[in-house]
Image (cartoon, grey):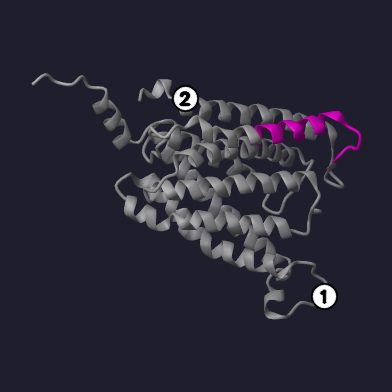
Amino acid sequence: MNQSRNPQRTVLIASFCLGIALGIFRLIVDLAYLEPEVELYRRGSVPPVILKVLLCVCVVLALLTVFVVRKKDQGLTLNNSGTVLSFLALLLALLILAYVVVLFVTQLKSGFSTIRPLFGQSDGSSSTAPADSLSVLLLFVVSFPVAAYYLVCFFGKKKNELRAGLSVFPILFYILIVIHSYFDSSAALNSDPKVMLLLSLIGCLLFSVEEARAVIEIPRKRTLLAFSCLFMICAIPQGVSSLVLNLSGTLSSECGLILPCIMIVYPLYAFFSLIRPAPKAEAASAESQKPASNP
């Protein structure tokens, strides 16, 4: 199949551009209508409602892209080579390590308030849930094989077996971030930024599952496209808005700019790993387009 006419590639590019557009719109809405003290949109405001409706519609459309892929189609292929992709993989590995180290050090400086409940040493002053305490510790442990997974992509395409063995760790990593963000007591559960953060993290998780399946060579071509589109539509707006709000001082988070940067770099990594066919798929496509030789 000619990649320039591949409808799946077109849908992927459209989802990436839509994610950027939603990110700009959400940033405008957040700057104008978000009340930082309670992390809720101003009551009675119309633009926040429009934002939420647009986000819901885009999520549904992203899931409907499963119908773009026909059974006879080759589907998107995961590429792990290229200068841009290697740079993004290295940057992602460094950001993940920085995020977990800052998170862990922040918890240590708080007087072990998230770690003491695990050992029954809570003094009653901490409202941290045990699940959050455990997630912080496990995030620290899991982050190193996760970083190794992306570093394998950085160092070259000849280490697929090692990458396949490490592919489960990004899934665990994003499961733990979802747990930590959900039980984080610094923001109310109904906080608008928190709800959108959780949605974007679930998008990260779904893409990491499909990426792992592609790495171990049992891809699901329909859900790979659908979850990739969903991921970009949810994560890019979260990254863009959170980054600017943290830079402007409107909002603050325990890890500062690191998680917003991950929310920007990870969709870029996903986009460049899928937009260009893998070498094997490219060769197979070229071979299928050769005219049959006469005997």
Q: What residue type is labelled 2?
A: Pro
Q: Is residue 292 visible?
A: yes
In magenta stretch: residue 280? no
> Which is nearer the eye, 267 or 224?
224
Instruction: Report the residue that reaches farthest toward the front.
Output: 71
Name the residue tied to disc 2.
7
54 within the magenta span: yes
Residue at image x 72%, y 42%? Answer: 246
Q: Is residue 258 visible?
A: no
Residue 216 point in image, percent of width and height:
38, 51
Q: Give the range drawn in magenta.
A: 41-59
Q: Which image quarter holds the C terminus?
A: top left
Q: Which residue lies furthest to the left in this view?
A: 295
- Where is residue 98 drawn, in percent x and y? 57, 53
Q: Position of residue 228 (x, y in %)?
A: 53, 38
Q: In this view, does 247 lie to the left or right of 221?
A: right
Q: Main secondary structure of the magenta part?
A: helix
Mark 1 surroundings: few (<14), some (14-19) or many (≥20) residues within 10 A: few
Estimate the x, y position of residue 11 in percent, counting from the top left.
Answer: 52, 27
Q: Is residue 39 left or right of 9 when viewed as pictured?
A: right
Under circle 2, the secondary element is helix
Q: Of all residues shown, which one is farthest toward the bottom?
A: 120
The residue that mark 1 highlights is 124
In terms of secondary structure, where does tag 1 sit?
Answer: loop
Pick the front one: 39 or 66: 66
